[in-house]
Image (cartoon, rainbow, N blue to C red):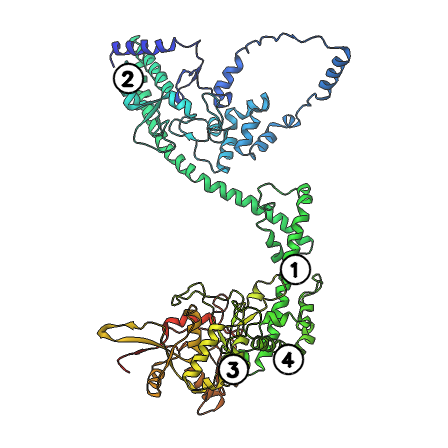
């Protein structure tokens, strides 16, 4: 650099300096060991300076403070006495911590986090002197490492680095609050306002400092985050204005020393430039480390918060264990708002939160014991079922209905939850009366169905006194016209239905009605609620569409409507075509019609043709019916042995059950209804398709724990009904 260039640069910088209100005190240049003038707007508190500056400031005389004038009126004697006594009562006592030996004091400081050290350094002159001295460097380093902080910034002391990282989030230039982002390239906190007024982009450097050589930028710290970047880095470099001016003055002094022929002045300047260049490179590398540390700060804070919440829950857990509660009951309060807090548990806080939390824990205990009681009762009910033939399993009442009987209910809902767990012996009387309970439930169901049949249907448009038209109506519960639907929300969406909102499935005869369950298996056991001990009561109604469909089917086979029973229709085992449905065209000009058994035909009409008044059926002759039956297959896991309880928990295919009957029971030619029974009523004639397992898909997908409602499977097989080509007929 030429002397003329230096003089112009110095004059330009001095001209800007002269606009200030007064001389600026000295500071560390750019956070390093090179001393230049301190910027006026730095706003750096005494915590930002190193120990040398602290010693230097101690040698100066403190500026005298202007005494305030007392402009208030003279107080009365009573008021003056009161003020004097108040000040005397609030006189602060000496801090006993300051009287500790120095080694003990340093040991205490060594166990404090950085935030506490910063607060202690502002407490009094003694602590400040010790904490800002060179001897305390190990204390600050240990605190930073304990807080998992990044390494100290190049050219900075441990004290100042801790203040930037862990100090109050305030701007170091104007003391503005809520400045949470640290610019590690510039090694400072700055608000948006100060960034806008102090950052100098590389592209604008020559406009702002026309008298300075751009080579000075290689000696300055910089950042890639501009004032308008919103936290996003860019490819541009931004420099702090005061750093530029300070570096210009520093280089000017070195050049003046060279002109004044100061010994080794040129070597001193070259060493300074080399050291400064190396320092800037170190700051850039260190900034990347700090950015990674900041990116992981959120995760670290969440981990620390989770750890504090865990410790609080452990303390609360220990309190409830002392009160005699079980671990699984205490876990119920794990997500309570009073538990998920970062504040350590104190005795005072425990007294405040104990009562509501104990209510929640006790409720969890009652819930757990109720479920345990229900499992014991369910085990006993399963043992009772094993003594019955499989043919009766399907019509057994639901567990929730059985357990609503007073014999079971009194034990299940006993309020003595502080006693020992309920055992099988407590249900001895209830188990002994199980046959009578089951019989009474089945009788009540039959009486309900009989009452529906005896009720004469009347049109809603009929006037009082009108005679009801002769619509078909069942005369007995086992009549083939006895078609029921459930009044509860037992409806499934059927894509084949012409009226999607009306897709109720029908239950034909007393056996299917008895097998219907409004609740899925195990729902009552797994979701037991003491406030709802009564199960859902199934309420049936006679299906008008189902009765008309059944009557049309009976007439198509040449039988009388009022005398034909379900057993007679099952014995015929005829196949029918629905004339209401449109046939499906296939390649080659053929048409395919779905074929149904008489039960599946009724369900099809009720679910898919609810808007049709008159069903139309076409019965297949014996040849075509046999052709359809040969194409029908049944690979569903819905069969069970009628001689043992082998399949009480898991049904099997008909082939496997037949093999079981032959092997285990020595029956050469097993027959349905006598040697094996079908527990799942898949009334739609199934064809070869994917194997389905019976039971609840939510809890026990491979087991049959209760008689399963057929309507749960009907929609699965709706598209698998066998088809007949029109060309065959």
- Mark 1 residue crowding within 10 angstroms, few (<14) / some (14–19) / many (20+): many
Label 1, secondary structure: give it.
helix
Quarter of the rendering containing residue 525? bottom right
- Mark 4 residue crowding within 10 angstroms, few (<14) / some (14–19) / many (20+): few
**Residue at which label 1 appears:** 366
The answer to which of marks 2 and 4 sits earlier in the sequence is 2
**Residue at which label 4 appears:** 435
Front position among marks 2 and 4: 4
Label 3, secondary structure: give it.
loop
The answer to which of marks 1 and 3 sits earlier in the sequence is 1
Q: Is residue 23 above or below residue 93?
A: above
* Whether label 2 touches label 4, CB < 8 Å: no
**Residue at which label 3 appears:** 479
| Inter-mark Cα distance, 4 to 1 | 30 Å
| Inter-mark Cα distance, 2 to 4 | 102 Å
**Residue at which label 2 appears:** 207
Q: Where in the figure is residue 585, as x and y percent of width and height?
A: 27, 72
Q: Where in the figure is residue 90, as x and y percent of width and height?
A: 70, 22
């Amino acid at each position: 650099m030429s002397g003329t260039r230096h003089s112009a640069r110095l004059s330009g910088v001095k001209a800007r300096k002269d606009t200030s209100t007064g001389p600026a005190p000295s500071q560390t240049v750019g956070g390093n060991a090179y001393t230049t003038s301190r910027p006026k707007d730095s706003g750096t508190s005494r915590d930002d300076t190193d120990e040398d500056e602290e010693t230097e400031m101690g040698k100066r005389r403190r500026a005298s403070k202007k005494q305030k004038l007392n402009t208030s009126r003279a107080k009365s004697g009573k008021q003056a006495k009161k003020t004097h006594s108040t000040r005397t009562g609030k006189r602060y006592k000496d801090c006993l911590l300051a009287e500790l030996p120095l080694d003990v004091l340093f040991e205490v400081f060594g166990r404090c986090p950085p935030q506490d050290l910063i607060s202690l350094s502002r407490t009094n002159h003694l602590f400040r002197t010790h904490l800002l001295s060179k001897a305390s460097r190990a204390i600050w380093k240990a605190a930073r490492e304990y807080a998992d902080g990044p390494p100290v910034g190049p050219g900075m002391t441990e004290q100042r680095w801790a203040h930037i990282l862990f100090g109050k989030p305030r701007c170091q230039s104007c003391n503005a609050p809520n400045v949470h982002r640290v610019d590690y390239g510039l090694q400072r906190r700055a608000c948006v306002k100060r960034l806008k007024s102090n950052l100098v982009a590389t592209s604008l450097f020559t406009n702002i400092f026309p008298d300075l050589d751009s080579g000075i930028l290689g000696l300055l710290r910089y950042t890639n985050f501009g004032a308008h970047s919103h936290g996003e880095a860019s490819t541009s470099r931004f420099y702090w204005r005061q750093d530029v001016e300070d570096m210009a003055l520093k280089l000017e002094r070195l050049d003046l020393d060279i002109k004044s022929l100061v010994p080794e002045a040129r070597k001193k300047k070259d060493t300074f430039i080399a050291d400064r260049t190396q320092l800037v490179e170190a700051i850039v590398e260190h900034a990347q480390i700090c950015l990674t540390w900041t990116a992981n700060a959120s995760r670290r804070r969440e981990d620390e918060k989770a750890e504090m919440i865990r410790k609080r829950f452990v303390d609360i857990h220990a309190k409830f264990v002392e009160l005699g509660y079980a671990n699984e009951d205490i876990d119920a309060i794990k997500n309570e708002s009073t538990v998920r807090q970062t504040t350590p548990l104190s005795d005072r806080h425990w007294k405040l939160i104990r009562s509501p939390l104990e209510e929640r824990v006790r409720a969890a205990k009652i819930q757990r014991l109720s479920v345990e009681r229900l499992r014991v009762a369910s085990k006993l009910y399963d043992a009772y079922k094993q003594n019955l033939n499989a043919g009766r399993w399907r019509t057994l009442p639901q567990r929730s209905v059985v357990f609503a009987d007073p014999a079971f209910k009194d034990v299940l809902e006993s309020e003595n939850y502080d006693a020992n767990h309920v055992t099988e012996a407590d249900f001895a009387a209830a188990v002994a009366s199980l046959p009578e309970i089951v019989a009474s439930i089945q009788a009540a169901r039959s009486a309900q169905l009989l009452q529906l049949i005896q009720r004469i249907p009347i049109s809603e448009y009929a006037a009082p006194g009108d005679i009801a038209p002769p619509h078909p109506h069942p005369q007995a519960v086992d009549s083939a016209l006895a078609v029921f639907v459930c009044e509860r929300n037992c409806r499934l969406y059927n894509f084949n239905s012409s009226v999607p909102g009306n897709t109720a499935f029908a239950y034909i005869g007393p056996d299917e009605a008895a097998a219907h369950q409004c609740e899925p298996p195990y729902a009552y056991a797994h979701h037991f609620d003491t406030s709802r001990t009564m199960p859902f009561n199934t309420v049936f109604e006679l299906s008008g569409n189902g009765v008309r469909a059944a009557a049309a089917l009976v007439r198509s086979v040449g039988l009388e409507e009022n005398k034909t029973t379900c057993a007679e229709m099952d014995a015929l085992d005829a196949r029918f075509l629905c004339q209401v449905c449109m046939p499906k065209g296939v390649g080659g000009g053929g048409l395919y019609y779905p074929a149904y058994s008489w039960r599946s035909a009724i369900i099809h009409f009720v679910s898919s043709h609810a808007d049709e008044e008159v069903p139309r059926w076409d019965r297949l002759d014996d040849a075509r019916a046999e052709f359809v039956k040969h194409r029908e297959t049944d690979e569903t896991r819905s069969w069970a042995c009628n001689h043992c309880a082998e399949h009480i928990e898991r049904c099997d295919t008909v082939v496997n059950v037949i093999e079981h009957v032959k092997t285990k029971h020595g029956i050469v030619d097993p027959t349905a209804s006598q040697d094996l029974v079908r527990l799942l009523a898949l009334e739609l004639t199934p064809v070869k398709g994917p194997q389905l397992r019976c039971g609840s898909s939510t809890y026990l997908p491979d087991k049959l724990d209760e008689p399963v409602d057929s309507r749960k499977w009907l929609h699965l097989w709706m598209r698998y009904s066998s088809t007949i080509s029109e060309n065959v007929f």
